[in-house]
Image (tube, helix red, strand yellow):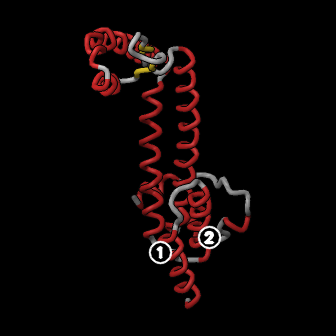
Amino acid sequence: MSAALLTIGGTSFNSSAAAEPRDDSATEATILARKAWRAVHWRTLALCRKQRRLESELARKVGFPHVLLTGAELLSPVRISSLRQFDELADDLPSLCARRAEVTAALRAHQQRWDDADRAIGYSVTRQEEAEASDYEERLISWLFATDAASLFGLSAKLDVLIPVGAEGRHFPWPELRRSRRDVARLAQL
């Protein structure tokens, strides 16, 4: 991981001049990890936006796979999105059991239209890329906070990551705050 971080480098996305090192601490592991995290974080956000846009496009063009089931035994039409949902309904209304093959065929046909449109626009590929980028981002965060800051710049790098991570609605970052507090106490003694 250290070798990868040394080769990543990158530019800071933080406009605060105070957050950037002004000396040779630029090779400090926490600062390199912050730079790597930022690059991955921005990629993850971009992939998330793209994935949402593509999913909306699929929903508009094809609609989420479903069958609208009507019948005398139903009080109103019922949207069925899976065979499991159909089976649960048929448990309560056994007269529907005879329509299982019809529902299966309709769901498969709609799913095939979804899959064809998905391949054409790349929704599933983008969703997989987003998941991989997010996993990598989480590993970088874990690695960053497991690493001791060697300077105030390193501590600042940790806080630069901690603030947006906490603001994104993830669990409140108590372990990371405690580690940063230990860094402050250690650095204050130097």
Residue drawn at x 42%, y 61% is 2
Q: How far apart are the two marked residues, 2 and 1, measured between alpha carbons?
A: 12 Å
Residue type of the residue flagged with mark 1: Asp
Question: SS for tag 2?
Answer: helix
Of the numbered discs 2 and 1, the one sitting upstream in the chain is 1
Up-down relation of residue 170 to residue 28 (above or below): above
Picture residue at 59% right of the left edge, 66% below the top: 157
Front residue of 110/143: it is 110
**Along the line of sight, the residue nearer the viewer: 180 or 99:** 99
Q: Are marks 2 and 1 in contact (CB under 8 Å)?
A: no
User: Looking at the picture, how far across and down is residue 89, in whole percent?
Assistant: 34, 24
* 35 shown above or below 114: below
The outermost residue toward the bottom is 189
Q: Residues within 10 Å of mark 2 (few under 14, many from 20)?
A: many
Q: Position of residue 154 (x, y in %)?
A: 57, 71
Task: Name the element at disc 1.
Answer: loop
Residue lying at 52% horizontally and 79% vertically, measured from the top left: 183
**Dot 1 corresponds to which residue?**
148
Q: Position of residue 73 (x, y in %)?
A: 38, 14
Residue 40 location in percent, x, y?
52, 48
Q: Nearer the viewer, residue 96 or 117?
A: 96
